[in-house]
Amino acid sequence: DGGITQSPKYLFRKEGQNVTLSCEQNLNHDAMYWYRQDPGQGLRLIYYSQIVNDFQKGDIAEGYSVSREKKESFPLTVTSAQKNPTAFYLCASSIFGDANNSPLHFGNGTRLTVT
Amino acid sequence: DQQVKQNSPSLSVQEGRISILNCDYTNSMFDYFLWYKKYPAEGPTFLISISSIKDKNEDGRFTVFLNKSAKHLSLHIVPSQPGDSAVYFCAAFISNFGNEKLTFGTGTRLTIIP
């Protein structure tokens, strides 16, 4: 059964600590994305990657880092430099990069709480 | 600057009636629009899309209408069912650009009352 797996579902961290959110897909999709959802706001793009070993900043990349060493995996690190890290984080993938023919498939998200 | 706006944060509709969710956009370059549905603690799932060369697209109980001159689109759900209770996001982009250019609205929480 293909899909996107995000782990863990809930994550709690102390302020000042880096934390890495996992995202794995077995859909054989080329492109992967990280979004952040905050109450009353739309989904905002953090980082995306269209091919292995390449990734680009989205609209709100500051305080985050990613890697794309394998096609299936796109982990997101929330660093201590991120001023408001508490949020719901969504990972997504698509067959290709173009949105016309390739809607995003989302994971079930990780809720990160930093205190 | 919110280029895609969903001005109603929430909507309640009686089961069996029509649900109409609205979305406005400001960027006239947008020419492809999508609706995603999201249940609590889950990721959004793609629902329906429409290209600007059309003004209507139907898929079962779901119909999306596009009014380009008003820069407005709406999602109609008929008849509404309890399982339709979710948050609905509209999204827009300029065709042939990548998904990274997808702009999401803030979402409307639809509650279907049995």
Image (cartoon, coloured by chain):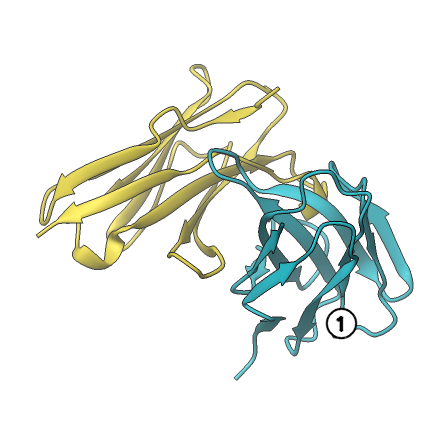
Q: Quadrant of residue A89?
A: bottom right
Q: Colour of chain A?
A: cyan
**Residue farthest right in this picture:** A53
Residue A27: x %, y % from top left: 64, 75
Front position in the image: A54 or A41: A41
Kind of residue at disc 1: Ser
Instruction: In the rendered view, tell whether residue A62 sits above or below residue A1.
Output: above
Q: Colour of chain B?
A: yellow
Subunit that carries the residue with mark 1:
A
| Residue for point 47% across, 55% down | B44
Mark 1 lies on a secondary structure that is loop
Q: Quadrant of residue B109?
A: top left
Q: How many marks?
A: 1
Residue A108: x %, y % from top left: 51, 64
**Residue farthest top in this picture:** B69
What residue would you read off at disc 1?
A73
Residue A71: x %, y % from top left: 79, 73
Instruction: In the rendered view, tell whether residue B84 sits above or below residue B57.
Output: below
Q: Tell me if I can see residue A102 in this picture.
A: no
Q: Is residue B15 left or right of residue B77?
A: left
| Residue for point 25% across, 53% down | B84
